[in-house]
Image (cartoon, rainbow, N blue to C red):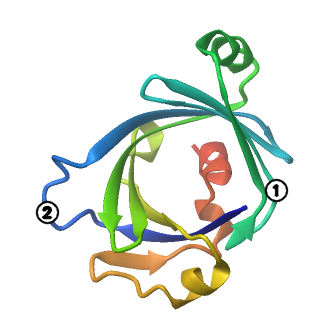
Amino acid sequence: MEIERKFLTDGYPESLEGFKKLEIDQRYLSFNPEIRLRKANDKYFKTIKSNGLLSREEHEIEIEKKEFDTLSLEAIGLIRKTRYLIPYENVIIEHDIYHESLEGLKIVEIEFSNENDAISFKPLSWFGKEVTYDINYKNKNLCQKK
């Protein structure tokens, strides 16, 4: 189960240097159901997600590079972004900086272990508008608007 809130942001208020960084290449095999391939640095994943906003089912498996490359030939969409992992209290803030046709877009995502924690989370001062419930900011939809 994925339980997550999303916010637009202008960026982290300090330097992101020193935080763990992932270069993400995200490709879609299907938008409904959502089937995604992801290369994050040197690891490869295939993920299936259900529909939903705050909460949804998510099944992710690690795959080999060869399988990623083969399946990528069938991809119908692509997003590239840099993700910084920022520890905060008992969560990790995932700060995504999008590239190419989505250049300039910055979103923070926070995953929670339960909906109560998600709902009670107070956004930090550098977070902007919440887009958790705005389907336009789902990656599968951003990918289609490029």
Q: Position of residue 80 (x, y in %)?
A: 47, 36
Q: Position of residue 92 (x, y in %)?
A: 41, 62
Out of 56 and 81, give the one closest to the viewer: 56
Figure label count = 2
Quarter of the picture holding the C terminus: top right
Residue 12 as seen in the image, left or right of residue 123: left
Q: Name the secondary structure under disc 2.
A: loop
Instruction: Examine the rendered structure and indicate whether residue 73 appears above or below residue 43.
Output: above
**Residue type at mark 2?**
Glu
Residue 53 visible at all = no
Q: Residue at point 46% right, 71% down? A: 7
- Depth check: give the residue in front, 100 or 19: 19
Foreground pick, 73 / 43: 43
Q: Camera-side residue: 123 or 104?
A: 123
Is the N terminus in the top left, top right, bottom left or bottom right quadrant?
bottom right
Where is mark 2, residue-wise?
14
For badge 1, the amino acid type reads: Ser
Task: Give me the disc on residue 50.
Answer: 1
User: Which of the 4 image quarters holds residue 113?
Assistant: bottom right
Task: Please tell me which residue is depicted at 13% across the width and 55% down the height of the picture.
Answer: 15
Determine crowd level at label 2: few under 14, some 14-19, many 20+ residues with C-alpha closer than 10 A. Answer: few
Query: Residue 76: percent from the left, percent from the top?
Result: 72, 30
Q: CA distance from mark 1 to mark 2?
A: 35 Å
